[in-house]
Amino acid sequence: MILVDTSAWIDFFRNKGPVAAVVDDLLGADEVALCGPIVTELRRGLRSGERKKIMAMLDGCHILPDPLHLWEEAGDLGCALGRKGATVKTLDLLIATYALSASVPILTTDKDFQMIRRVATHLLLEPTSLPGAGLV
């Protein structure tokens, strides 16, 4: 199971780059995971013409459960990053917290997750996501 971040979905919808092919393969293998923040980002950005089709596809994906201490852990992660001079988007902190809680890798093209790994070194990033981000 792999948590597919919004940035990877965008590549998939645009049929752009190697990440799009990975999302397609994951969908075919029933290995796509989503979490609340990703669902929110996707639903927010869908155009009305594509909404019904895409929502049906997303309904077939696995939804990760909310981590018990989601808000505290995401906030602590952001604080630890701030101490290292890094600032990342709040939704990315939440997404990383879901992935860490479920011990699943993230498929993403968003460099915020590389910064998050500076603190959460056990955060797994799918190798095809970002150069040098491989599974650790």
Image (cartoon, helix red, strand yellow):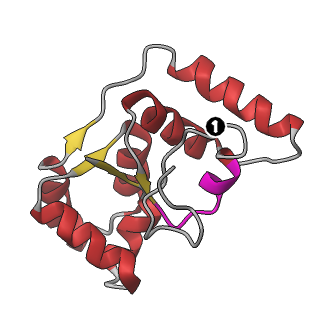
Q: Is residue 81 left or right of residue 6?
A: right
Name the kind of residue labelled 1 in the image. Answer: Ala
Q: Residue 40 or 12: which is nearer the viewer? A: 12
- Is residue 64 something that shows in the picture? yes
Rendering quarter of residue 45: bottom left
State left or right for residue 31 relative to residue 136: left
Q: Secondary structure at mark 1?
A: loop
The reply to whether the magenta stretch includes residue 21 is no
- Name the residue at the front extreme: 136
Decide: few, some or many residues near mark 1? Use Cα within 10 Å; few <14, some 14-19, many ≥20: some
- Residue at x-position 15% and y-position 48%: 59
Please tell me which residue lies in front, 60 or 113. 113
Instruction: Give the image quarter of residue 122.
Output: top right
* Residue at horizontal 45 percent and vertical 65 percent from the top: 127
Q: Please tell me whether residue 13 is drawn above or below residue 55 in the rendered image.
A: below
Asked if one can make out residue 52 in the rendered structure from this viewpoint, the answer is no
Span shown in magenta: 108-115
Q: Position of residue 128 (x, y in %)?
A: 43, 70
Rendered location of residue 57, percent (x, y): 14, 59
Instruction: Point out residue 110 in the picture as x, y percentages from the top left corner.
Output: 57, 63
The residue that disc 1 covers is 120
